[in-house]
Image (spheres, helix red, strand yellow):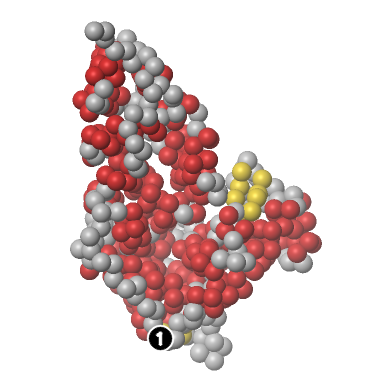
Amino acid sequence: MTSRSPRDTPLRLVPRRPLTAARRTATTRRPRPPRPPEGTPSVPDLARLARVELDDAVRLARWAGTGPGTAGPTGILDDPVLKEAAAALDLTPGQIRAAWDRARLAGLIELHGGAARPGWRLRAWDNDDTAVLRGWVALFDAWSLAHPFLPHRTAPAAPAAPETDGTDPALVAEVIEAAPQLLSFLHLSNGPVPIDTLLDLLRQRVAELRSERHEPPTDGAHDPLPALLDWILDAAALVGALRPRDRHRPDEVALTELGSWAVWVKLEQICVAAQGPAGHMEQSAETMLRACARLSPGPARAEYRAWLAARPVAPAVAELLDTARGDDALLRGLAFEALRVVGDPAEAAVRAGVDEPVLRPYAVLWLAELGGSDPDDATALLTREEATWLWVDTAAAVADHGEDHLLVSHLETAVQGSVPGLLEEVRNVGHPRTVQVLVALAAAHPDPAVAKAMRRAAFQVHTGEA
């Protein structure tokens, strides 16, 4: 009787079974999707309005994909390209700059090394109404970036103090946070609303935010809120969410059909989160993601959307990435699933995470999928070491939250062709959970020789022999 050796043991020892089998199957019947308010245009009609709104941005994105289309490191067009685009598209340089910003925010243009190329949304622009509406909603969500606040343009006549520009950056951030409430009020009013009413509502909301954060109230001597309200209304009008002001009733404003539909969608997401049994709208990202680990992919995505709809995009993305930096590998993967729901507005923050070892494999795959790559093909962008690190990270998630048979099934997803090859690279990859993963695999694996090899590898890593 001879002992067995793992030398030639193949990895595919058990039938293939997806990791998503570890998630609990949804047993509740999904309710009928809510219907938009009576009078809301159909999806094709809304998409037509969005195409009109983004016409210049689409023209510029297509020109950038076939012409020079180069930009500086910050994504700003230089003067020669600006003039060339203006001449080619019969637009002014100012219109080109605005269209360029809108095209980037709507996902029509992607920048790679200072060169612009058409985004996946542009490729679907003519035949996918849903992609069009999502592109416009991305622009709508980024209204404060599409039309940045410039104090020298909107500040009141009273001179500012010499050492400041007259506007507290924290106040601008609070106004941005209060804007969804103003837009919701406009939607629920279902008609024109006096600007004075919106100003009172803005003052009340800003006062609440300042009180919650134990900040002093705004300076009554030089009240900046009227100028900031004008900024919100102008920006909403420029992205197509607010009707141009009627010269006969200049003191009233109303949402466009696109704007009203977008606000309704966000309100529905919030209501579903607040009323549903899985609602975690007011919880932290970590708590929400832990709850989503028990859901199947469809309900989990609905939970992500509701959680995101209840907070500004930038802080939400930052909180998800902070959670992804933690020790729980499962939450790391789920955080990037939630970021896939965010889409284009999360690109800059995710791209910054490429330089962080714990985020890099996830960020590389996320950015590739955002650019239109097939998820299976995107893994080729990872180095062998990065792919192995990701394999260990996923194994850690399964070991902590899954079942033994799922952990054994995870073996067949490794890029190495045999157990000894896998163990050699796993020992050297430097993942902080390597020892725990190898011990868990040894305990779960049905083959005694393979289990022994994994225990030996775990001991070597633990003692520093690797």
Q: Quadrant of the N terminus?
A: top left
Q: Which residue in the rendered view is the most extreme toward the front?
A: 1
- Identify whether 463 is placed above or below 343: above
Q: Which residue in the rendered view is the most extreme toward the bottom?
A: 248
Q: Residue 384 placed where, x, y %?
A: 48, 26
Q: Residue 227 placed where, x, y %?
A: 47, 71
Q: Residue at x 45, y 51 (%)?
A: 346
- Secondary element at tag 1: loop
Q: Residue at x 60, y 50 (%)?
A: 110
Count all numbered tags in the image, as a single digit. 1
Disc 1 marks which amino acid? Glu
- Identify whether 366 is placed above or below 44: above
Left or right relative to 288: residue 173: right
Q: Residue 339 placed where, x, y %?
A: 40, 50
Left or right relative to 40: residue 90: right
Question: In front: 130, or 83?
Answer: 130
Question: In front: 97, or 456?
Answer: 456
Question: Label 1 belongs to which residue?
Answer: 38
Q: Residue 322 placed where, x, y %?
A: 34, 43
Left or right relative to 418: residue 402: left
Q: Residue at x 29, y 71 (%)?
A: 31
Residue 77 visible in rendering = yes
Q: Residue at x 27, y 44 (%)?
A: 22
Q: Quadrant of the C terminus?
A: top left
Residue 395 visible in rendering = no
Question: In front: 53, or 206?
Answer: 53
